[in-house]
Amino acid sequence: MEILAPQDDLALAAITEAVGAEALITDAAERAYHSQDVFSTGPTVLAVFRPTDKDMLARGIAAATQAGVAIVPRGGGMSYTSGYLAPEAGALLIDTGSMNRILDLNEEDMTVTVESGCTWDKLQRTLKPRGLRALAWGTLSGINATVGGGMSQNGVFWGALGGTVVDAALSFEVVLADGTILSTGSNFFRPFGPDITGLFAADCGALGVKATITLKLVREGTAFSYGSFSFPDANAFFSAMSAIAREGLASESFGFDPYLQAQRMKRDSLTKDAKSLVNMMKAQGSVLKALKEGAKVVAAGRSFLDDVPFSLHLICEGRYQSAVDADMKAIEAIAVKHGGKAIENTIPKIMRANPFPPVNSMVGPDGERWVPVHGFLPHSRLIEAWDRIQALFEANKAEMEAQGVAAGAMLAAVSRSTCLIEPVFFWPDALEELHCRSLEPSHLAKLNRFPANATSRAVVDRLRKEIVRIFRDLGATHLQVARTYPLEEASDPRAWTLLRAVKQTVDPQGLMNPGSLGL
């Protein structure tokens, strides 16, 4: 039986008095589970606090910090940059999963307010029947990832033409370290004066814990067009993706290098793919077209990318079919101009049909461990970054092969001026409890189970850090900064001094997710 230190026992008693024993989890196995993310394991937390509303959240935070206990907020647990891993044992981890209500849906003003534990999947399922969606509406892990986590870590994928998820935010209610609930501004226009919402956006929980979020809504498209293209090399791929992004033609634009697309094509089943697509197209009112598209998925099989070096996949969304078809025609012309050729467009159709699938991709298709690292760069620096990363892999090829470490990359356009390069590592290693609970049980049962492999993991850790340095040399920016990306090094010294002053103001004891952002 675990014996708490006297100071921990007293702190836990004070927190319990403030929120009630039913809101706290103190079981050792559960505390250990909540002390790991997708890549790392941190010191064990004192307890897991599951508030049911913002007032309980505020009471719990105030009681903890008055007792000298650090606060670590956790969203859906899908991050891999140590954002909710405390630097020392004994922190109070806040799990907002019970704060998952949609508080207000204002179709007249085109806004929605949710509690921070609401998932992107729940929000999308609520809005879709009304023909609405958030401006940027989540990451691929949205079945687990929460809106509050997205606002704290930032994220991008669905609706990327409208920016990252924090660009969809109008205002927050944030609980500060002393339990104060702060409103960041107007619930219909941002900003009014200096952008206080923006100050708390992407803070990785270093400045406060988000309780509620108000988001901008837009009409969901009623017409869609899908395109996929093959490119012979990275230069042709990046040139085409950048040219398409500058024109603002696609709502989503993403692609894979040869290794990662081969890994992705091993996943799931054609039956599930076809069913998702048929259901989506039936919902759009075309039963005959739905059946035809489902049959095309099965006929295409999983071999249509076998000889494709780089693949680019795009979705055009709008009100009129003629308009989105014209946009896709323009995209095809750009792709061909840069050496691309059209291929079967199964991937974007399936992904749009099931935007928030089970998170089985958080491990490799054979049960390997998986972790990304990423950088956002302007179009002018993409090829240099890619070449330097490939040179790093080539220089470490022998060691990577010896340790079973492999790497691919996801690539995406996220605005008219910016693209994402996200190298992804796979290596043989033991799965943690987080993986086992997150994967579908039927999928987990089919996977290999590797023994713990600290040597291969160390190789991955070193290569990730070297890629971060390459990105830093090129002036890249990052999402979910947490404890992985060098924000201070990338900041103007005067801006960093200002940020530290803000931190001191809202968190004078330094107990709000200490070490996050490097603060």
Image (tube, grey):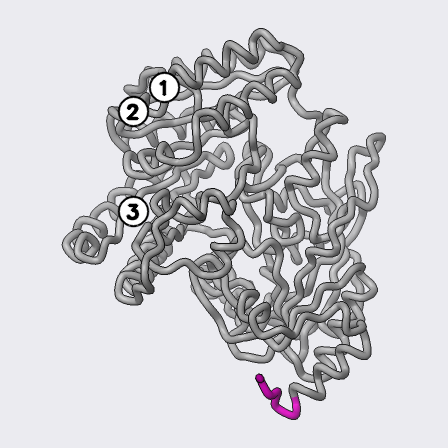
Q: Is residue 4 found inside the magenta-colored segment of the image?
A: yes
| 1 or 3: tag closer to the N-terminus | 1
Q: Secondary structure at mark 3?
A: strand
Above or below, 168 against 505 in this view is: above
Q: Quadrant of residue 306?
A: top left
In the picture, measured across the screen, residue 312 lies left or right of residue 191, that is left
Q: Does the segment drawn in magenta span residue 67?
A: no
Q: Secondary structure at mark 2?
A: strand
Label 3 crowd (10 A; few <14 / some 14-19 / many >=20): some
**Circle 3 sits on which residue?**
407
Mark 1 and mark 2 residues within 8 Å of each other at the beta carbon:
yes
Please, what secondary structure does the residue beneath circle 1 have?
helix
| Apparent side of residue 358 relative to residue 63 in the rendered image (left or right) | left
Please tell me in which quadrant of the rendered image residue 14 appears.
bottom right
Does residue 172 appear in the picture of this structure?
Answer: no
Determine whether 459 is above or below 71 in the image. Answer: above
- Towards the viewer: 10 or 199: 10
> Looking at the image, is mark 1 or mark 3 nearer the viewer?
3
Image coordinates for residue 497, horizontal then vertical, percent:
56, 70
Q: Counting residues from the N terminus, which is met first, the one under dot 1 or under dot 2? A: 2
Which residues fall within the magenta stretch? Answer: 1-7
Spatial distance from mark 1 to mark 2, Cα to Cα? 8 Å
Amino acid under disc 2: Phe
Residue bearing the label numbered 2: 231
Circles 1, 3 touching at the beta carbon (< 8 Å): no
